[in-house]
Image: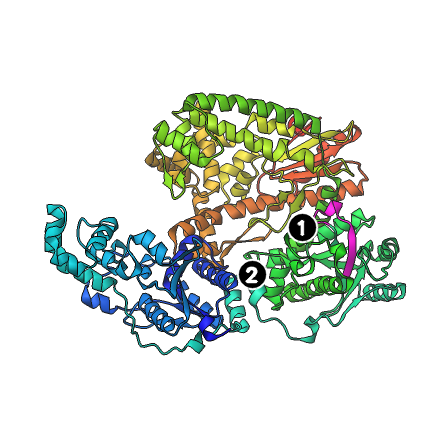
Amino acid sequence: MSEQNQRVYLVDGSSYIYRAYYAIRHLSNSKGEATNAVYGFTNMLLNLVRDEKPDKLAVVFDAKGPTFRKELYPEYKANRSAMPEDLVPQVPIIKEVVRAFNMPALEQAGVEADDIIATLAKQYADQGLDVVVVTGDKDLMQIVSERVCLLDTMKNKISRRDEVIERFGVPPEQVLEVLGLAGDTSDNIPGVPGIGEKTAATLIQEFGSIDNLLQNIDQVKGKKRQENLREFGEQALLSRKLADLLYDVELDVSLDDLELEEPNREALTELFKTLEFHKLLQEFSAMEQQEEASGDNYQTVLTEAELDEMIAKLREAGRFAFDTETTSLVAVQAELVGLSFAVEAGHGWYVPVGHMYLGVPEQLPKDLVLEKLRSLLEDPQIEKIGQNIKYDALVLRNAGVELQGCALDTMLLSYVVHPEAKSHGLDALAAEHLNHRMIPYSEICGTGKKQICFSEVEVEKAAVYAAEDADITWRLAEKLLPELPQGEPEKLLREVEMPLVDVLTRMEWRGIRIDADFLGQLSTEMAEKMKALEDEIYALAEGPFNINSPKQLGEVLFEKLGLPKGKKTKTGWSTNVEVLTNLAEDHEIAAKILEYRSLSKLKGTYTDALPKLINPKSGRIHTSFNQAVTATGRLSSSDPNLQNIPIRTAEGRRIREAFIPEEGWALLAADYSQVELRVMAHMADVPALKESFAAGEDIHKRTASEIFNVFPEMVDAEMRRQAKTINFGVLYGMGAFSLGKDLGIGRNEAQQFIDNYFERYPAVKDYLQAKKAEAQEHQYVTTILGRRCAIPEINSKNGAVRSYAERNAINYPIQGSAADIIKVAMVNIDKRLREENLQTRMLLQVHDELVFEVPPEELEQMTELVRSEMESAVPLDLPLKVDIGTGKNWAEAH
């Protein structure tokens, strides 16, 4: 490409910084340092390079200190608020990132970024080069020419001469005249009072320039406008001078300096590690050049002799890392394509068993491989290491092999050792801890419509990809194990999290039955109810509209019907739950819309969706339980998510009726009673609350009695409701504003309730302060079992972020301890089920509740077993209490 055909891109870095900062909020690393602007800026820059493929590029910034414009007009930009406190330290890091990408980061004292851009744009355009200025700043439209255009990547819009005329009403060479007349409030350029951009454009269209306009003021329509022009004519000339750009800034930069080069991967590695940008780290880090990372020592096992030799080495090692390659992400349905193994860094084996494509080499039969591996995989004395090993255990179980000896899961090891990490996935861990970029799945299988199944991947390619997984898993175990703190964290991993893998594997494999016919009937009922609600809403709205369109809904509520409490956003009227809930107090239409939305969500998420998720082989649905997702250690579930079925509404409770046991069996549901309040009473060492729980008192009634200073017999239903809100509000660090909102009272009255509570229970207040202090010192808080719950934002300079972190510092230890308690109970119950050879199966864990499928002859025994194990899971200074119910479906049991 000749130099004349090349495009030069000049990026308005200062504009990008602010746009990135406001586009992404509340992102920080594990030290609590804000990283949102750096992350947004980096991605915007990368997208620009990928989408535009520029030949030459520079990023231009404003330098610190005053500019010549400040000398001309001391009030220039005087109205601008100070840069946000958490943005200030990100600016130099952004410049570091630019330099690490080997891109020029230009700035010069005394002038602004726009002046540097104008100078370079003119210089390169005069040389016959095309220049693209990347900015969202309208002021730069004055430099648009035949060879210079503006690109707003946020709006995906290019501005050339026609777009400038459309925006300002005048061509680029007259934009400066419009800016002089209209001024610019963002830069505090005064212009002429009473003349905005449209009027300025009309005047310049007629008179051509400010100078000519001022010489012909008598021809201007309107006496007031003539007076303003006479009085503020000099101000218009000054404003034009302030808005005018320099085209002759002396810069020590050549065109060759703008040539795009390969990034400095070592510098980017260090930056992205510090910033904890895991995806970017995987992509740009300086990867290992050692032989062990090359894949040369990965062996594909294609003969029985090679398989026997590998098995002998795995058995001799007594401990190995392994991984499975399959046809599906849904473990209980996935078919095995191959297995990979490793017992030392840089080495690995891949055993293909299910590749299918034209010309595929002869593979060992799957049945033969599994039979030979069975004694190894089912031997509890030989330790297995995996990354998300539960998935592999389910895949093997589907293939007829029951994996035993799961000694370590590197995902869970990372979750315990580095709870602050944004991701515990293999790619992120490899980049973070081994400085190694994993082969992306997309590189092997493709993406979108062209994506192929792993079984169609060439064995040679698959071998390197798969063996790398086992190799890196082994190396991660070697790297992270020494970092596992001795004592409570190690015990948590060894005695709770790892045994729980086996428990969850059995639960997911078993699945739970659902009554598809019942759900179909419920779906029909909901559809009918939604249609009736639709008609009622149309009647109240005085005409039909699309209820599911926030735009149309906002127009109906706040423009057509003129309802109060409306809030406008950039895209129109807000119609979120909070807005509608406030309106629903006085306006029936809002209440009906909320009910309609609730039914629509239940229907789409559950009654319509669950039957489609029934596994044709088992006739059950199989949710996945996630151990390494939440900050507190709580399990979450997905595909489907059974944690979020609402039980406060009649329709939500009816969905639970669809969950049924094996024919002739019963469901048993065991739910911890007020476990988080009990945990708080224990952790905060609150004598009055501990005594109350020990005596089996109604804790909310007791709290009401204390804070309202009345005898327990005098506590009425409203007092108890308020006390309950306060009890749980304290757990979540709720302040007076939120409490008042929940109780429907004023802020001062709510604050009085809180003050009374802390006066009666001073130990609680001391505990809350202690937890905040613990978080501030360590950036984490701990649970009863020593789990570290990361709170990196606790020392943030952003008040809102810091307040949120302080609430978490109070809540995380309590919620995390409750999560630990039920995990211990699950491990202990599962152990007894197997030891006592019971038929009962644990099926679900939902928050503080466990659900079992029980044959009738074991119901009485299981009720006692479950109660005993759950109530004794972790010893507290007060009793844990479990409510147990049984029934022919989940709703009845709960």
Kind of residue at disc 1: Val
Looking at the image, residue 844 lies above or below residue 531? below
Q: Relative to residue 285, is residue 505 drawn left or right? A: right
Classify mark 1: residues with Cα within 10 Å, few (<14), some (14-19) or many (20+): many
Of residues 801 and 227, the one drawn nearer to the viewer in this rendering = 227
**Residue occupying image coordinates x 23% and y 69%:** 68
The residue stretch that appears in magenta: 328-340
Horizontal and vertical percent for residue 487?
A: 62, 58
Q: Is residue 685 magenta?
A: no
Name the residue tied to disc 1: 496
Q: Nearer the viewer, residue 555 or 847?
A: 555
| 681 displayed left or right of 199 | right
Q: Residue at x 32, y 65 (%)?
A: 114
Residue beneath disc 2:
278
Three-letter amino acid code at the position of disc 2? His
Left or right, 872 with respect to 169, comes to: right
Using the rendered view, name the quadrant where residue 345 is placed.
bottom right
